[in-house]
């Protein structure tokens, strides 16, 4: 069977154009996954996302993607990269849009920033990260590099899964990894050259 390199999961949760353009820019074959049977055609998966946790999970359920996604990631160990909301969906539970169970790939939950703080919410713009695990996503990327964030909720999980942190009034998980599962809270597709470098590193996993 012919495998395209990257399958970008389309579950109607945000604009996918910037992700597809970034993959095109680094010259990697990619396609949209819009039906269950297409998952097996991809060598690697990207789960992007913009919007609320509950709406996104409802969309995955409506499309009947959850069981096949779990099979590809947990059973077949296919590498997956979650971007922003996509990473958050990897957790067990989220509260955006109402209490909702996530995919449960990683133990933990997705909680809101403190609305009573002096910080503007959502957290929008460039912020530097502290890299805790250089391999594999951050090869050739130095700690304190800037990436582009847009989010009101953040991941709370076991420290062993956190590969980078960011500070926005509170230290939060900027990226995570567990076996074949990778996630970034920031948007690599909007983070210029460093974001493209991170996507290239994911291809080498």
Image: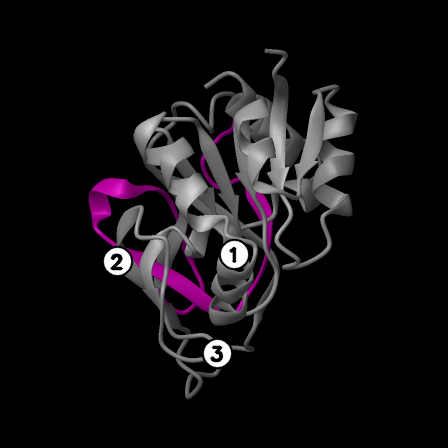
Q: Are marks 3 and 1 in contact (CB under 8 Å)?
A: no
Extreme top residue here? 1
- First to last magenta residue range: 141-170
Cα–Cα span, label 2 and label 1: 20 Å
Q: Residue at x 56, y 73 (%)?
A: 122
Labels in figure, total: 3
Residue tagged 3: 97
Judged left or right of residue 60, residue 191 is right
Q: Nearer the viewer, residue 10 or 162?
A: 10
On the image, the x and y values in percent for residue 161 come to: 27, 42
Q: Are marks 2 and 1 in contact (CB under 8 Å)?
A: no
Mark before the other along the chain sequence, 3 or 1: 1
Image: 180 above or below 28: below
> Would you call the spot at circle 1 few (<14 residues within 10 Å), some (14-19), or many (20 or more)?
many
Q: Residue at x 72, y 23 (%)?
A: 26
Q: Are marks 2 and 3 in contact (CB under 8 Å)?
A: no
Considering the numbered disc 1 on the image, is that residue within a helix, a strand or a loop? helix
Mark sitting on residue 60: 1
On the image, the x and y values in percent for residue 173 come to: 37, 52
Quadrant location, the C terminus? top left
Considering the numbered disc 3 on the image, is that residue within a helix, a strand or a loop? loop
Judged left or right of residue 139, residue 90 is left
On the image, the x and y values in percent for residue 119 come to: 50, 77
Extreme bottom residue here? 116
Rendered image quadrant of residue 130: top left
- Asked if the stretch drawn in magenta spans residue 160, the answer is yes
Judged left or right of residue 174, residue 121 is right
Considering the numbered disc 2 on the image, is that residue within a helix, a strand or a loop? strand
Residue tagged 2: 108
């Amino acid at each position: 069977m012919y495998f395209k390199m990257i399958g970008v999961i389309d579950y109607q949760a945000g604009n996918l154009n910037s992700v597809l353009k970034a993959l095109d820019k680094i010259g990697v074959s990619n396609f949209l996954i819009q039906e269950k049977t297409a998952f097996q055609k991809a060598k690697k998966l990207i789960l992007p996302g913009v919007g609320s946790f509950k709406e996104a999970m409802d969309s995955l359920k409506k499309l009947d993607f959850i069981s096949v996604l779990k099979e590809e990631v947990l059973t077949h160990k296919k590498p997956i990269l979650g971007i922003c909301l996509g990473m958050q969906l990897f957790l067990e539970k989220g509260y955006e849009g109402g209490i909702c169970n996530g995919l449960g790939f990683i133990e933990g939950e997705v909680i809101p920033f403190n609305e009573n703080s002096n910080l503007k919410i959502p957290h929008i713009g460039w912020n530097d990260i502290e890299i805790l695990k250089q391999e594999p996503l951050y090869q050739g990327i130095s700690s304190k590099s800037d990436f582009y964030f847009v989010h009101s909720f953040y991941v709370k999980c076991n420290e062993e899964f956190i590969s980078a942190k960011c500070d926005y009034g509170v230290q939060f998980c900027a990226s995570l990894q567990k076996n074949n599962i990778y996630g970034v809270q920031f948007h690599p597709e909007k983070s210029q050259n460093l974001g493209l470098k991170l996507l290239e590193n994911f291809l080498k996993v």
